Structures are given as structure tokens and as C-alpha cells.
Image: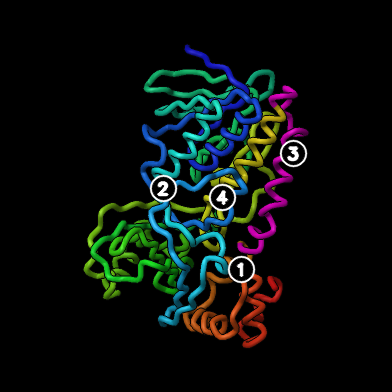
Amino acid sequence: MRTLKCDVVVVGAGPAGAMTAKWAAQGGADVIMIEKRPEIGSPIRCGEGISCSWLDRVGITRDPRWVAREVRGAKIVSPSGHSLVVDEKKFGSEVGWILDRVLFDKALARDAAVAGVQIMLKTAATGLIREDGKIAGVKAVNHGEEIEIRAKCVVGADGYESQVGRWAGIDTSLKTDDIISCYQYRLTNIDYDPDFCEFRLGSVAPGGYAWIFPKDENTANVGLGVHLSKLKNPGDVKGYLDQWIASDPRLSKGQPLEAVSGAVSVCAPLDSVCMDNLLLVGDAARMIDPITGGGIANGCKAGMFAGKVLAKGARSNDFSMKVLQEYEDAWRDNMEDKLWRDWMAKEKLITISDDTLDALVEAVSEAGVERISVGSLLTAVKNTHPELVKEFEDLI
């Protein structure tokens, strides 16, 4: 059996994996990154909307080739059609740019390659290698050939369906209440406002929301996510999307160019994402925002934190939990509080009626806020309509 050796093997070449690999290699680690698919970035399973405010902080330089559309802001639409319009500065992590995710993911992988990372496509991890009770790499199949990649540390960046965490014994299991089922079309021939993302709340997408993310003047990513507990059958999410499109005159004449489906975790942060000689990052580490379902920014930030710590581990030849704890502390300091707050808010939002959602959106619109977040929204509502936020008091 063919055997490769390295300091770090990264399983998964999405944004979190590529960022981890790049920062580790830049710091001197010998890194192999494997990807089970034949093409990085495809197929797309993402709405593709991000903010541009955090990219510089993680070392990503804008390339106009992967910015499909710049938008002015977002419209949050209540069940009755009342709109709250906010710009990117106020809204945060989900508006600003609409990506071409295929090109974006390839660009991050290219940066990793420039840093010295070896990339292997059509290479699926099949299990962990253990020696003397320690994790010592991964077993994989590369273009049909069984191989071993011996590594001092394994990184699970293998997304929502992550197997690396399960193989290692890290509990990444999800309850029904912590899963959103999604369906999306790339819809063309539509008549809409291409300068704004749109988020539509309420029974159009029970327990989740519907979205329109502009790609060009008459084409957008149009999709929705439904809380799994609200579905009788998993396939019903497509029915919700088709029903919304048919009922909206802006969208009803649209034609699909592609369709994608999948699931998103909307759980509370994990107790730990590290152990001796192994760590998880991005969606595999359940770092998706429970309110928005967005994971690109968190995955890239965590990838940078992880990569820097892995580089230190390579220099000291030590990937024990004692060393990896620095990564655990860094990602928690950066995002854990917000993930917890948004998870608690999600737990309550899925229980409220369309009428209450209408009142909440109208109250926020009347109050005005400088920065859109769970805390600021609820504080604004409390100042004008305190009766609406009694059940959210512990989040303010």
C-alpha cells in the first residue's frame, strides 16, 4: 500500500480546510490537503452571500473574479410583507458580496498551494490510523487506490456530514431541532431588486427563512430552509420553495439553471473540537451561525486560528491537546458567545407565530438600530414594544 507522510493532513478542501492548510504551511508545516470530489468548490451547496468586512483579517485579498455581485444591503421581510431595509454595515456577516463559490473556493485552495500545500483530489478519507493508542493519520482511497497518509495531526474539515469527528469519538451528532433542510434554485428571468439580498420570515419557510441572493440583473439564488421538525417528509422542503416562487409575481416566471439541496446544522457550540493529534474546523466543528445558517466567515476565521497553532505544533513536534488548546481558546474567544446567543434565539424564534414576527419586524423598523444583531434587535423592540420580547428577556 502506498504511504505518504506529512506533519498535517487536512480532510476537506472547502474554505475552512484551505485556510487551515494555508496558515499551517505558511508557518512551516508540511501539509497535505485531500478532497473527495474531483473539483474544488463544485457542486455548490451555499447561498453564496458574505460580508466583505472580515476578509482582510484572515489574509484573503479580494479578486473580482469570485465576486459575482456587490449589493447595497438586505431586506428583512415579515410574513405580511413589511420590509426592514438595512445596509451591509448594519447587517454584518451575510450581505455585502455574492460570491461565485466555485471560483472562491478554488482561489483559497490556490493560496494554500502557493504556501506549499500538496492537494490531492478524488481522495476520500475512509478512517483514522491509530498506533499505540494515538491518531497517526488517515486511511484513504485515491482514484480507486487504497493509500495511507501518515500525519502527526489530522484536521477534520469535511463539512456538515463530517466523519472525521465521529471516527475520533468527538460527539458531533445533531438533534432534529438542530437541523435545517434547504433547497435552492439558481433562478433566471426574474423581476426583482438586484441591489439587495432578501430574507423572508415566517410560515413561507417554517422555522427557517427564504432568501433571494442576487447574481445578476435577472438571476438570483432563490431558496429556503425549513426546520427539520416542521417537515413531514424531508423532500417537502422543495414543495415549500416551489409554492413560494409560484405565489410571488417577481419570481413566478423564473426558470431554473440549477438546483441544490442539503442540510445545515444550527446547534449550540460543541464542548470540544480538539483532542491529541486531531482537530475539527468549520462546518465539521458545528461553527455555523444558528440564526443565519452562514458558515463561510466562521470557517475561515477558525481555519486561520487552527493553521497558526498547527504551525507551532510542527515546529515543536508536539500536537498534543496541550498545544491544540490554543486553537480551542482562540475560536471560542472570537465566536462562541455569539453562537450561543444565536442558538438560544433560534430555539425561541421557531416557536413564534407569523403575527408576532410581523410585529417584531415593524417594531425594529420603527426603532432603528445602528448594528443588526440578536441583542440589538431585541433591545430596540423592548424600548418600543416590551410585550413582544418578554420571552426573550434572557437574551438582552
Instruction: Locate residue 367 relative to residue 188 in the image: left or right.
Output: right
Near mark 2 (Cα within 10 A), the count class, few <14, some 14-19 or many ≥20, is some
Q: Nearer the observer, disc 2 or disc 3?
A: 2
Q: Which residue is mark 2?
A: 66
Marks 4 and 1 sit apart, C-alpha to C-alpha, by 20 Å
Q: Is residue 176 visible?
A: no
Q: Nearer the observer, disc 2 or disc 1?
A: 2
Q: Which residue is mark 3?
A: 325
Secondary element under disc 2, as helix, strand or loop, is helix
Residue 249, quarter of picture: bottom left
For the residue marked with disc 4, what is the amino acid? Answer: Leu
Give the vertical position of 300 relative to 350 (above or below): above
Tell me residue 302's x, y (percent). Answer: 62, 45
- Compare marks 2 and 4 and give the one earlier in the sequence: 4
Marks 2 and 3 sit apart, C-alpha to C-alpha, by 34 Å
Near mark 3 (Cα within 10 A), the count class, few <14, some 14-19 or many ≥20, is some
* Figure quadrant of the C terminus: bottom right
Tell me residue 170's x, y (percent). Answer: 63, 39
Q: Nearer the observer, disc 1 or disc 3?
A: 1
Total marks in image = 4
Marks 2 and 4 sit apart, C-alpha to C-alpha, by 13 Å
The residue lying at 61 percent from left, 70 percent from top is: 371
- Compare marks 2 and 1 and give the one earlier in the sequence: 2
Which label is found at residue 373? Answer: 1
For the residue marked with disc 1, what is the amino acid? Answer: Ser
Q: Which residue is mark 4?
A: 55
